[in-house]
Image: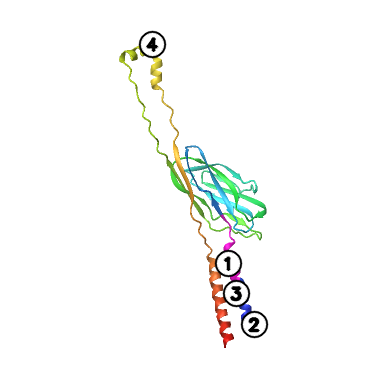
């Protein structure tokens, strides 16, 4: 009887731990945006860390982006973080479309904070995704990686904005006046006709939207189910034994 109660107690503890471990998982998120801009201009991609109530001390962001559509102009780490500028922890590669940034948060943070702002240059129209890779990390107080929900994809849609055509009304001059102008100004008139109007910059409609984060915690779910079965089985056993 005493042994059964001990098993029941430990099953209950494991069950509680499983629920808490499933909730205590940090994740990244990005700010969605939609705007219109022109070729060569920049867009800001804000990355946030959501600790979900558990203190995070050191975070490594590994991001992949479409190198044919976007190029990183700069990365600004939020002021609260201390950067780790070491090989393998700090990288911007516009040829391969890879960004790696690592930083520590003094005394840790359990509140949602901005990790950094990536400034992208728009190269051309297209549709692809910016991905926060599963190689990203965020360490807790015991040095364990508590980051979950990876990879995180944000769809990027860059499309050429429709140009509004403006009709120009031409005023025809009498033949006599044109002839007089040609005689008076000579080659200057020819030069004016050869001049081309400056090309208008190409405008783009840009939209960024993050896909829903998949909550994958299969191991914790298995422990929860198993613990619940053991707990209920022992509870039923003890109730029946007591009634006999």
Q: Reading the chain from its start, which is encountered first: label 4 or label 3?
A: 3
Q: Residue at x 62, y 80 (%)?
A: 5
Q: Quadrant of residue 234?
A: bottom right
Residue found at the very far left of the displayed protein = 175
Q: Residue at x 51, y 51 (%)?
A: 131
Q: Residues within 10 Å of mark 4 (few under 14, many from 20)?
A: few
Cα–Cα span, label 2 and label 1: 26 Å
Q: Confirm or deny contact between disc 4 and disc 2 (CB under 8 A).
A: no
> Disc 3 on helix, strand or loop?
helix
Q: Residue at x 56, y 84 (%)?
A: 240
121 in the magenta segment: no
Q: Reading the chain from its start, which is encountered first: label 1 or label 4?
A: 1
Give whichever of 234, 101 is nearer the camera.
234
- Residue of label 2: 2
Q: Reading the chain from its start, which is encountered first: label 4 or label 2?
A: 2
Q: Residue 136's x, y, as percent?
A: 57, 54
- Residue of label 3: 11
- Residue of label 4: 184
Q: Is residue 238 above or below residue 194?
A: below
> Disc 4 on helix, strand or loop?
helix
> Disc 2 on helix, strand or loop?
helix
- Residue of label 1: 19
Q: Residue 146's x, y, as percent?
A: 60, 59
């Amino acid at each position: 009887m005493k042994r059964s109660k001990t098993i029941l107690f430990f099953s209950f503890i494991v069950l509680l731990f499983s629920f808490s471990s499933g909730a205590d998982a940090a994740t990244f998120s990005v700010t969605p945006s939609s705007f219109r801009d022109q070729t060569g201009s920049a867009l800001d991609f804000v990355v946030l860390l959501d600790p979900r109530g558990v203190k995070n001390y050191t975070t490594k962001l590994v991001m992949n982006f479409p190198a044919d559509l976007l190029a990183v102009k700069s990365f600004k780490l939020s002021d609260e973080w201390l950067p780790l500028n070491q090989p393998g922890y700090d990288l911007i590669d516009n040829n391969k479309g890879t960004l790696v940034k690592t930083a520590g948060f003094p005394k840790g943070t359990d509140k949602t904070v901005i990790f950094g702002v990536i400034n992208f240059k728009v190269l051309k129209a297209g549709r692809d995704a910016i991905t926060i890779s599963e190689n990203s990390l965020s360490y807790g107080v015991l040095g364990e990686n508590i980051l979950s929900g990876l990879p995180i994809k944000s769809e990027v849609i860059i499309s050429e904005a429709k140009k509004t055509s403006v009709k120009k009304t031409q005023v025809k001059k009498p033949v006599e006046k044109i002839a007089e102008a040609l005689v008076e100004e000579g080659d200057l008139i020819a030069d004016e006709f050869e001049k081309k109007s400056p090309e208008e910059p190409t405008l783009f409609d840009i939209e960024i939207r993050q896909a829903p984060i998949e909550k994958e915690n299969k191991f914790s779910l298995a422990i929860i189910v198993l613990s619940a079965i053991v707990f209920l089985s022992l509870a039923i056993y003890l109730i029946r034994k007591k009634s006999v």
